[in-house]
Image (cartoon, rainbow, N blue to C red):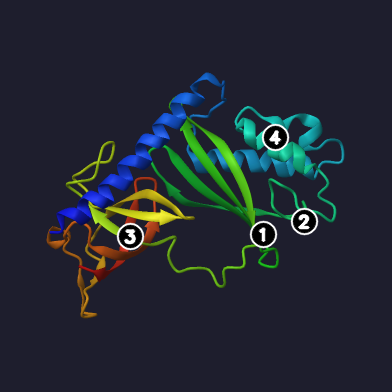
Amino acid sequence: MNKQKISIVVGSLAVVIVLIFAWMFFRGSVKQGVSMEEPIDIVLNFYDQWLLELQSPDTDPYQSGLAQASILSKELKKKIKNAGGNVEGGLDPVLCQTTPDVKIATREVYKQEDKAQIVVTSRDQALTGQAIIMLLKYNEGWYIDDISCSPGEFGPPREFSFEREGFLLKDNIPAPYDSQYWHLVFEENDEQGHVAPLFFNAESECTNLKEEKTACVPEQFSETNKVLVQGEMTERGAEVKKLKFLEE
């Protein structure tokens, strides 16, 4: 086992955790509305209401005050206000589409102890825009911290809802993560320190460095092994379908 490698991975993760808690502490003086619902339900409810008002002939999210809802962060309210409400010929800053005539689909990218990311897309495949929503935990609830628009030009849909490269940690995973489970520590959008608990079953397939495929035996894993994990993201973590070892 490479103790130096473990120290580097755990150290970078610990720094991220400390920074997150410090950031949340200093934001504590700002009154922020939260919801006790699950992140994906918060997003779905907000977007359903946003669409309803966009499509209404009598009002819109800016007139009704929805664009300044308490569930949104102060910075996001300002961002939406500055973008304006002219969806005709422009990009709506919440929906991330150029038309309000859409039916939406939501997908949870990940959910961690203190943050979650949800993607909202149109069910019409001709509309490729995506709204990427970041939610943060505050006072035991969740709020929408940021919404960013992506053109969605990522090629065909992926087979797995979770597909990341990273390093395995278990015994050395810092609190508040549960060391009885293996975790994948990975990078997301150039941000280090993302963590996903891994859950294995009889169908989980592992591929070693010799490209040999077998049923996964987590008891034989080593900390800081670099791996590619493919699976389905759930509320508790990633259910592993395939795991490929990339480095010892």
- From the image, tell me which residue sits under label 3: 166
Q: Position of residue 82 (x, y in %)?
A: 76, 39
Asked if the residues shown at circle 3 and circle 1 are in contact, with their CB atoms under 8 angstroms apart, the answer is no
Tell me how far mark 3 sits from mark 1, CA to CA: 28 Å
Q: Give neighbour class at mark 3: few <14, some 14-19, many 20+ (Cα, 10 Å).
A: many
Q: Position of residue 166 (x, y in %)?
A: 33, 60
Seen as rendered, the residue at the extreme front is 4
Instruction: Give the mark nearer the N terminus: 2 vs 4.
Output: 4
The disc placed on residue 155 is none
- From the image, tell me which residue sits under label 2: 98
- From the image, tell me which residue sits under label 1: 129
The disc placed on residue 78 is 4
Q: Residue at x 19, y 56 (%)?
A: 223
Q: Position of residue 36 (x, y in %)?
A: 48, 29
Tell me how far mark 3 sits from mark 4, CA to CA: 35 Å
Q: Amino acid at mark 4?
A: Lys
> Dot 4 lies on which element?
helix
Q: Amino acid at mark 1?
A: Gly
Quadrant of the image occupied by residue 233: bottom left
In this rendering, the label closer to the viewer, 2 or 3: 3
Q: Is residue 79 left or right of residue 223?
A: right
Tell me how far mark 2 sits from mark 3, CA to CA: 36 Å
Asked if the residues shown at circle 2 and circle 1 are in contact, with their CB atoms under 8 angstroms apart, the answer is yes
Q: Does 222 sit above or below residue 23? A: below
> Dot 2 lies on which element?
loop
Q: Does 101 sit above or below residue 173? A: below
Q: Residue at x 71, y 47 (%)?
A: 93
> Dot 1 lies on which element?
loop
Q: Amino acid at mark 2?
A: Thr
Q: Quadrant of the N terminus?
A: bottom left
Q: Position of residue 139 (x, y in %)?
A: 45, 24
Quadrant of the image occupied by residue 164: bottom left
